[in-house]
Image (spheres, rainbow, N blue to C red):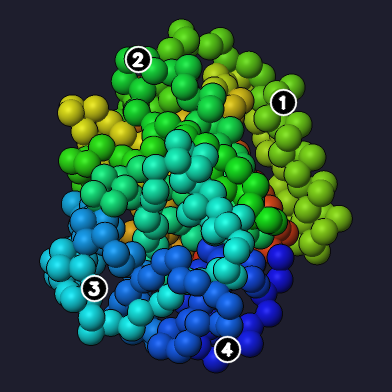
């Protein structure tokens, strides 16, 4: 639904992060959102949030009316956050324990609905509470700058502060695809319970369509989960467990006749129709096929975004979340390659060419433990980089915009590798 805003106090009229998140969470124009103003005529208030620290610099929307839930929304999983963010959340979480009185210095956002209209028909939190058993829920959410590849996420709590889940909202083509893919992955991962060394994924609690949004609710993480260090060495046993899901090692299969290569070819052909740079991707896939036509490799599943910030430890076991890029039938070693690429690109801020070199170095250092010989390691690296550019194109084509760190730089890297 489109949102027509009449009131200057409605944050949905803003172009910043608060406006973006408000439009995603409250898309129905019958819902009133007011900050410091009167409710729309004929409306009744159904929820209130503290806007922290201000409307102009909003970072969090903290639910009011249940102090324990408000405090929990800021304090839960703080051990997973960077030190500065953790300190800020701890300070505000302490204030939230005193309810509205503690958060009084911050502006209040009031959510209202027309009298006589059930809130469950208009508010996502009410709909999810009904889907999850009917216990009333309070939602909190962070505010980030507008991001066409970002998914607003509701933290759901009982009034006593017990976490109930995370609701991820797909609001455009790119994010709808990601939310749908993660829900499918989590359904499939129910079968891996008890598989030795496989990281524990969150369970899928429910999924729903809300207007033109797709929403998936996943289980909360264990309350005492701790993040793995960003310099944590690769966990080879876990990577193998993700790839094989408890099955024995698969026999290597020729790359040239793989369904994976078929998929890359089809995606590159689609890109060539939609995007001028797609012709370069078609050439890159063809070069990949020629270079590695005689290479056989084991294929399996991958997490798809295996990085330290998506991993944690609980009760001696590895926990992994954000499975939205998970897929079957990829060359064994893709998660190891992705880990190296993202640490270089994201953590160290290095360009795509340096990140590609980090992939080669990590595969040379650890690939033998995955059973990869030198030729297979080069195949994994080359195929992974093509996969990553095609992922970048898919997201851009779905409305997320180009990732400037990867396009066109990653195509340049790929082409140089195939001519070296």
Q: Nearer the viewer, residue 162 or 346?
A: 162
- Residue 7 shows which numbered tag? 4
Closer to the observer: label 2 or label 4?
4
Q: Are marks 2 and 4 in contact (CB under 8 Å)?
A: no
Classify mark 1: helix, strand or loop. helix
Which is nearer the N-term, disc 1 or disc 3? 3
In front: 389, or 416? 389
> Considering depth in this image, is 1 or 186 the residue closer to the camera?
1
Q: Could you tell me which residue is drawn at 18 percent across and 76 percent down?
A: 101
Confirm or deny contact between disc 1 and disc 3 (CB under 8 A). Answer: no
Q: Secondary structure at mark 2?
A: loop
Residue at the image position 47 percent from the left and 49 percent from the top: 167
If you read the primary sequence from the N terminus, does the residue marked by circle 2 or circle 1 appear first? 2
Mark 1 sits on what residue?
259
- The residue sitting at 26% across, 60% down in the picture is 66
Give the distance between the C-alpha atoms of the residues marked 1 and 4, in whole angstroms: 54 Å
Q: Which residue is mark 3?
A: 100
| Separation of residues labelled 2 and 4 (CA atoms) | 54 Å
Give the number of the disc on residue 194: 2
């Amino acid at each position: 639904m489109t949102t027509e805003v009449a009131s200057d106090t409605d944050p949905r009229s803003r172009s910043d992060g608060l406006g973006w998140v408000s439009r995603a969470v409250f898309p129905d124009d019958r819902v009133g959102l007011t900050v410091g103003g009167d409710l729309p005529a004929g409306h009744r208030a159904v929820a209130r949030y503290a806007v922290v620290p201000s409307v102009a610099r909003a970072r969090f929307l903290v639910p009011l009316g249940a102090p324990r839930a408000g405090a929990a929304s800021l304090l839960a999983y703080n051990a997973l956050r960077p030190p500065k963010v953790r300190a800020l959340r701890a300070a505000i979480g302490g204030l939230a324990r005193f309810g509205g009185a503690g958060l009084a210095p911050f502006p209040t956002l009031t959510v209202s609905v027309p009298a006589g209209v059930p809130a469950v028909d208009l508010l996502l939190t009410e709909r999810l509470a009904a889907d999850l058993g009917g216990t009333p829920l309070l939602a909190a959410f962070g505010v980030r700058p507008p991001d066409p590849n970002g998914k607003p996420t509701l933290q759901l709590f009982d009034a006593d502060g017990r976490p109930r889940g995370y609701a991820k909202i797909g609001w455009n083509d790119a994010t709808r695809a990601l939310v749908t893919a993660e829900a499918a992955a989590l359904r499939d991962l129910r079968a891996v319970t008890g598989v030795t060394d496989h990281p524990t994924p969150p369970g899928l609690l429910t999924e729903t369509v809300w207007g033109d949004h797709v929403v998936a609710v996943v289980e909360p993480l264990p309350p005492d989960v701790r993040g793995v260090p960003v310099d944590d060495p690769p966990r080879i046993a876990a990577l193998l467990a993700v790839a094989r899901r408890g099955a024995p090692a698969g026999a290597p299969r020729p790359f040239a006749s793989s369904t994976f290569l078929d998929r890359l070819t089809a995606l590159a052909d689609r890109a060539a129709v939609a995007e001028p740079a797609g012709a370069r991707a078609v050439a890159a896939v063809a070069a990949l096929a020629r270079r590695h036509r005689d290479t056989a490799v084991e294929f399996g599943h991958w997490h798809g975004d295996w990085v330290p910030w998506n991993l944690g430890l609980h009760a001696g076991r590895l926990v992994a979340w954000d499975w939205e890029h998970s897929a079957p039938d990829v060359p064994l070693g893709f998660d190891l390659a992705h880990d190296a690429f993202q640490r270089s690109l994201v953590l160290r801020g290095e360009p795509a060419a340096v990140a590609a070199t980090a992939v080669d170095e990590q595969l040379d250092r650890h690939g033998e433990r995955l059973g990869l010989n030198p030729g297979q390691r080069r195949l994994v690296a080359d195929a992974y980089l093509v996969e990553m550019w095609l992922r970048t194109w898919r997201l851009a084509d779905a409305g997320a915009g180009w990732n400037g760190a990867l396009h066109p730089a990653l195509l340049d890297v790929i082409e140089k590798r195939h001519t070296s």
